[in-house]
Amino acid sequence: MTARNPVRAWLGRDINVLLLAGAIGLAAWPFFAGDAYSLRLLTVAGIYALAAIGYQFVFGHAGALSLAQGAFFGFGAYVAGILSVRMGAGFEVTFPAAIAASTVLAALVALPVLRLQSHYFALATLGIGQVVLLVAVNWESVTGGANGIPNVPALSLLGATVGRGWPMLLLVWSLVAIGALIARRLTGGLTGAALRLMREQPMAAEAAGIDIRGVRFAAFLLSALYGGAAGALQVHTVRVVSPEVLEFPVMVMLLAIAVIGGRTSVAGAILGAVLLVHLPEWFRPLERYYLMAYGLALLAMIVAAPWGLIGLLRHVRQRWLPEPEPPPPVAGPMPVGRPPARLEITGLTRRFGGIRAVDGIDLVVTPGESVGIVGANGSGKTTLLNMIAGAEKPDSGRIGWAQADIAGLPPYRIARAGIARTFQTLKLVDGTTALDNVAAASWHEFGGPGRDAARAAAMALLQKLDLAETAWKPCGALPPGLRRRVEIARALIGGPALLLLDEPAAGLTAAERDSLAGTLAALNNDGTTVVVVEHDLAFLEKFVARIVCLDQGRIIADGAPADVRADPGVVAAWLGQPLDEGGGHG
Ligand code: ATP
């Protein structure tokens, strides 16, 4: 085997060669257009790049449409401007103060706004900017009112002045480089895969132990931190702070940079910022048609590259220079199993309006058992499973697990307590490989830098479930039987003591059902407790020793499969009913 040249390998991976070319171009550019105005434009582009890299944490990575980034940017600018003009503070004070002020503002507003769903969240975050703008306009004695504060002194760092032109440009772009490196570190590796899982399949992410609320909170704060930093740089560059910095066009500019550059790529934020700051200048000779041309250019970019410019470059690269599939990673040890525990449910009830979906269920599952839950459509099976997994909150009742009552706990805490689940409708990230779909679910365990260890553990599970061939294949390209298995592999990566499966055989061929039953039997033999909601009795009988039948939210039979099958109540409520779409009963 020939040794791979690490430089060539680095250049060949992803968009690195484009990044390198961009960085060289950026560095060389002012030498050709070195007038004061060009240097200033490039400095402003750097400032917007920093604010946009920050914005990507919440908008891109956490997938929440925040419209508060302009407010954090403007707030940072005001804090730095006021401290600089009124108190004569240097950059060593104004910079951290602006960062701290914007981050504290974000922490204060996060609690109420992060609870809101999508468009309400967007509106609420837009409101933050309006409130800060009102304060800036009306608190004249401090902010200078509608006129703002002119004559902000040049940036001074520990007594030395950083002048306009080259010095300011270099300072700004050095901070952009630092901000970019930190952002890449924070969102790369296994964290990137976990964030994608969180964005595309939030329920699956929570079931993998990811605290979505906590991640969103951190992302919102990080956005504000970068916004405040950029605001402080802005005020020392333009030397004035006025309400304009808090107005909507700033937010629109940041949103456009993130969308056009690419939502989750640091390189995209930089590319987008450089482009959007310069675009109006390029169109200026068109005079009164300039705004129209600018608008059309933006529209054309969004239509041509809906995944952003970086997405487009990646797409082109993949088309013309496809990367060969690497050999599968070496499998590591199997995940360490959690200590076995007893599941003890008493008086569990959940109502939806007038319907008692689950009506006072008492159920004990002992460690190592394998239990099937059956019943007619709408008998409460999924609701019961969802309550055990935390996806539904019970109205009353207790769910005892490992000496604790877990009823009503959020799904991520139940997952961390050793209970894993799969879903009735598959919740995989289709654009991600099978390997990374599984590995992402161990982010809570391994953390961002632990991608190799997570992949090794994921590979061990893929091998165990006969999925080794699929490691580098995107999940969207796999047949249903294999996709079901990938979801089971993902559920197993935390080494759960209890595995809950919701209709795992739905949509599978007879051969796939047989093989899945074998897999579940083997898992159960290895010590994992298994609880399966299913319609297919014949499938269940291959690996469960006990069946519980529900009817209208209550248990009507509980015992050995043959006894349940023969139970007159079960025949009346379920087996005597017509078959469901999934070809139930068996
Ligand atoms: P299936 O076999 O069709 O999946 P199931 O036995 O899993 O059915 P559940 O999905 O638990 O049954 O539903 C039990 C009852 O609760 C049904 O009448 C259903 O319509 C109702 N229900 C479930 N979820 C909700 C909800 N989110 N809102 C309102 N009603 C609901």
Image (cartoon, helix red, strand yellow):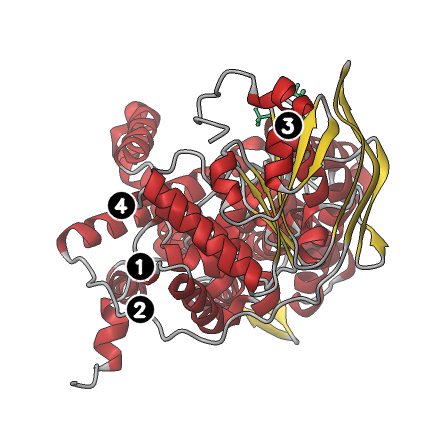
In what quadrant does ligand 1 lie? top right
Query: How far apart are labels 1 and 4 at the CA level?
Result: 22 Å
As drawn, the label of residue 312 is: 4
**Quarter of the figure that contains the N terminus:** bottom left
Q: Is residue 254 left or right of residue 8?
A: right
Disc number lying in front (1 or 4): 1
Query: How far apart are labels 4 and 2 at the CA level?
Result: 27 Å
Residue contact between numbered discs 2 and 1, judged by CB atoms under 8 Å: yes
Pick the residue in front: 317 or 93.
317
Residue 14 to residue 539: above or below? below
Report whether the residue tagged 2 is closer than 8 Å to ligand 1: no
Label 4 residue SS: helix
Return the disc, 3 or 2, that comes first in the chain's sequence.
3
Residue 480 to residue 517: above or below? above
Disc number lying in front (1 or 3): 1
Residue beneath disc 2:
328
Return the disc, 2 or 1, that comes first in the chain's sequence.
2
Return the disc, 1 or 3, that comes first in the chain's sequence.
3
Residue beneath disc 1:
472
Report whether the residue tagged 3 is closer than 8 Å to ligand 1: no
Residue 74, given in percent of the width and then of the height, sits at 63, 44
Give the image quarter of residue 509. top left
Asked if residue 252 can be seen in this view, the reply is: yes
* Amino acid type, label 4: Leu
